[in-house]
Every structure is written in structure tokens, then in C-alpha cells.
Amino acid sequence: MARPLRIEYAGAVYHLTGRGNRQEKIFLDDDDRSGFLEILEKTVHRYNWLCYAYCMMDNHYHLLIETLDANLSLGMRQLNGMYTQFSNRKHGKVGHVFQGRFKSILVEKDAHLLELCRYIVLNPTRVKMVDHPGKWQWSSYNATSKRNDVPAFLSIDWLLAQFSKQKTTARKCYITFIAEGCKEPSPWEKIVGQTILGSESFVEKMQAYLTPHKANLEIPKSQRQAGRPQLTELIPISIRGEKKNRNRAIIVANLEYGYTLKQIADLLGIHYTTVSKVISSHHR
């Protein structure tokens, strides 16, 4: 299976995960975690990132990052590469620390950033390492709720401003918001095409980056769609019950003729995420 394409642009927000090679621990002690945070701070500063949340477990980490420039891969190469050097040198090892390349989910900021900030800091409680997120010192929870000093690389102003203009009130609301998240389902159920978490319009916009025909987007929409067949001609009733033929027609309608996920989904009476998965599978 081909790896999902990276979508990089200025102002993109990502949930990032790095896991240990062969599922081994990447943090053997607290000094390792402190070292990782120092490298993260340097990376955030050098690449002009905003870090909204983080959590370090034993064999993986979670980050929520906004890239003010289109440089996600460059920054992650430094973060994981420098930590690998640090860890190997400290523990007298050689070779890979991380399992392949990092995983990234592109996130619609206004719709899901709060939800993911909550998901990230609740990781230790979800796997029962602690019974309250404040008891795990290696996440952004305590800094955001003002239990600890805020690290220089952590951006909490936007997050707290979503609750109140008054920081004291905002922090109280943040604490309540995190506590309520224990009952919420995983946000990963909403991911489209392995890589995108957002509204229908956001998915539609990002879909352009995932198609081999994105160069065609430079041509005005009116020209690209001039004279195209009707959608009912591309996906006739006769093939809608045949999944293989239907899916082939969906791909043609979207990639060659520019019909949107919603237009196709409405015609077929299915959810737009189902259409997106069909198109995404075409690139695997």
C-alpha cells in the first residue's frame, strides 16, 4: 500500500505521532523526555511553528502543530533526527529509534483543534497510566491549566481564548472541557482518507492536493467543466448497484470532470466520506 501523501501549506494544522521502532520505548526515563522537549523547543523556534498541545508516552508521542510556513517535513526531520542522535548517544545504541516516518493528520483548526488538544492530554488516563491528566507531568495539560510554568514553545493563548477572554475563567473552563472529554468518542472515527480531519468543505478543499490532476486546478473552473457530461451519465443507475463499476465511475467523475464529493454523494444517496474513501483508495 502506498503511503498517504503529505499535504503542506502555510497555516496548516497537524496532529503528529512518532512511534518507537518495533513498538519499543522511545523514552526510557525522564531525562529522555526532558531532552525531547528541548529539541522540540529548538524545532518550533527554528521552523516558525506553533505548538498547541503535546504528550509523551513511553513508546510514542503526540503533538498538535501549526506550520506558519509550508515546512512540516523539514521540521519533523530535525525533531526525530536530533532526538534519535540524542537517544542513541545517551544509551550507547545505534540505528532507528522511530518506526518509519511520522504519522500526520491534517486538521481543520476551527472545527477540531480543541477536540484534539483534549484527546492528546487525555492519553495517559485513557490507558490508565494515571487517573487524572494533571498527574502526568509530560503533557501540556498542567501548563495550559496553569498548574506549571508555560514552556517557551507552547502556545496556549489561542486555545484559552476559545473559552473566555479572562484567563482565570478560561483555565477553569479548559479544566472542565478536558474532564468532559473522558466520555467522548475518539475523533479518529471522523478521519477521511487516512489524512484529513475536518468539515465537508475542508475535505473538498484538501482533496485537490491528493489528486494527480492538481495542476489542472490552475485552469479556471469554468473552462475545466465546460462541456462535461452530466453526472447521471457518468454514474448511470444501471451500475450503481455494482460496487466495482460504481467506484470506477466515482473516480472518473471526481478526478477527470471535477464533480465534488457532495454532488456525487447526493446522487448516490451515500455519505461524502464514503466517496472520499473510494477516491483515496485509487492512490494507494
Image: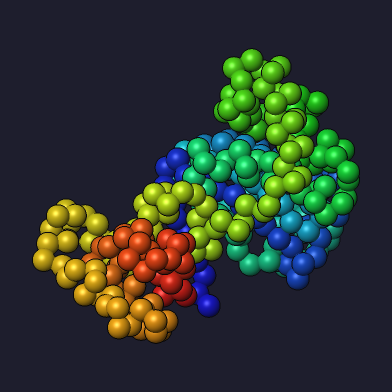
The residue located at (74%, 62%) in the rendering is: 20
Q: Is residue 69 left or right of residue 190?
A: left
Residue 132 at x, y percent in the picture: 85, 40
* Image mark count: 0
Q: Is residue 21 left or right of residue 230?
A: right
Colour setting = rainbow
Residue 266 at x, y percent in the picture: 35, 62
The residue located at (80%, 51%) in the rendering is: 126
Residue 90 at x, y percent in the picture: 82, 53
The residue located at (73%, 23%) in the rendering is: 172
For the residue pair 159 and 27, the one nearer the viewer reads as: 159
The residue located at (39%, 84%) in the rendering is: 242
For the residue pair 232 and 222, the one nearer the viewer reads as: 232
Q: Is residue 154 left or right of residue 190?
A: right
Q: Is residue 150 visible?
A: no
Task: Judge whether 95 appears above or below 120 on screen.
Answer: below
Q: Is residue 272 visible?
A: yes
Q: Is residue 206 left or right of residue 135?
A: left
